Amino acid sequence: MNARAELRQRGMAVIAALLVVVAASALATSVVERQGVLANILVTERDRAQAAWLLQGGLDWSRVVLLMDARNSPTTRLDGIWARPIIGLPVGTAEDPNRALFSGQMEDEQSKYNLRNLAEGGRIDPGEVQALESLLQWLDIDPALAEVMARRVAAAQFTESGPPRAVGLRGIDDLRMLEGFTPRIIDTLQPFITVLPAATPVNANTASAEVLGAVVGKLGLAGARELVVQRDRGLWFTNRADFVNRVRSKEKDAGQRISVNSNWFRVTGEVTVGATLVGMRALLHRGNQGLASVRWVTY
């Protein structure tokens, strides 16, 4: 009995030792896994920080490009250096330049209809509403939504009687909160409508036919398309008078809502560092000396 008991005790001791080994192995595996997860998190955060730093460099590049464009030409045109996108530019280290890739482009926000033009001092401008109604109709969107947008813009302005009654729109995406605006409508409006801090004219050298036809009243969509075809062949507008002369037979006051240069630009960019992708959007305002300031930026 003593021998059997001794064997049994030895067997239990072996089993206990094995259990300790298994537990220790499981604990070690857990620690290694956690260290691996932590290491991945640290690498990802490092890559995100590097990408954000590179995107800031892309923003500075945009400001330099706008300054060069202002010095090289008194007009803002689609053949300007600002309009050339950058795709997959290696911006990594000298040892591994392809580890980080930058892509970015600028859009002329004055090529679009500015919703800020719809009202001033809380008072809706009927002429601007009519122009926006025409644009919506050509985009196959209910023209009645122009009045909805105008009321929203007016409500966000200071008036003689008091402060704004609503928060101002920052971008087209904010229209989602208004009745009647579906994701499809928002996507359709993106290339044609903008929201800027101040009222602006439309740049005839960069605007689409739909926007030009809407803001120049009797020019119409057909006339605007013909004008845009000529423009894009290289017949750029040199000044407002040049634009008026080309459309004089259609609209005697065609130049009131038109310009040939722009001061507002939207910058979009993204940087890929390893497996990490970080995007950026920013709004730039170019001053009289050609220097551009950042009005807002999101990552």
Image (cartoon, rainbow, N blue to C red):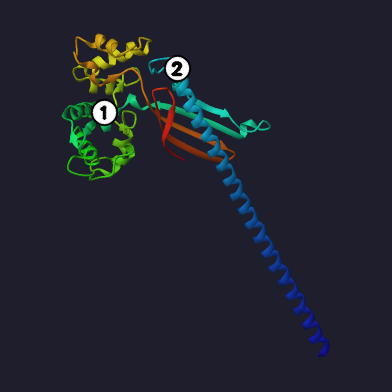
Left or right: residue 291 versus residue 128 is right
Mark identifier at residue 139? 1
Position of residue 285 in the picture relative to residue 97 (left or right)? left
The N terminus, quarter of image: bottom right
The residue under the point 25% across, 45% down is 166
**Which residue in the rendered view is the most extreme toward the bottom?**
1
| Residue 266, quarter of picture | top left
Extreme residue toward the right, this view? 3
- Name the spot of residue 221 as percent of width and height, x first: 24, 19
Q: Considering the numbered disc 2 on the image, is that residue within a helix, a strand or a loop?
A: helix
N-term mark: 2 or 1: 2
The front one of 45 and 15 is 45
Place of residue 63 in the rendered image (x, y in percent of width and height, measured from the top left): 47, 27
Asked whether, in this view, residue 93 is left or right of residue 121, the answer is right
Type of the residue with mark 2: Arg
Inter-mark Cα distance, 2 to 1: 36 Å
Residue at numbered disc 2: 71
* Percent of width and height locating residue 229: 33, 13
Residue 202: quadrant of the picture: top left
For image coordinates 49% across by 31% down, the residue present is 59
In the image, 237 versus 240, the foreground residue is 240
Q: Tell me the kind of residue under disc 1.
A: Leu
Mark 2 in CB contact with mark 1 (< 8 angstroms)? no
Crowd rating for badge 2 (residues with CA inside 10 Å; few <14, some 14–19, many 20+)? few
Rate crowding at label 1 as few (under 14), some (14 to 19) or many (20 or more) other CA atoms within 10 Å.
some
Displayed quadrant of residue 83: top left
Q: Which numbered tag is attached to residue 117?
A: none
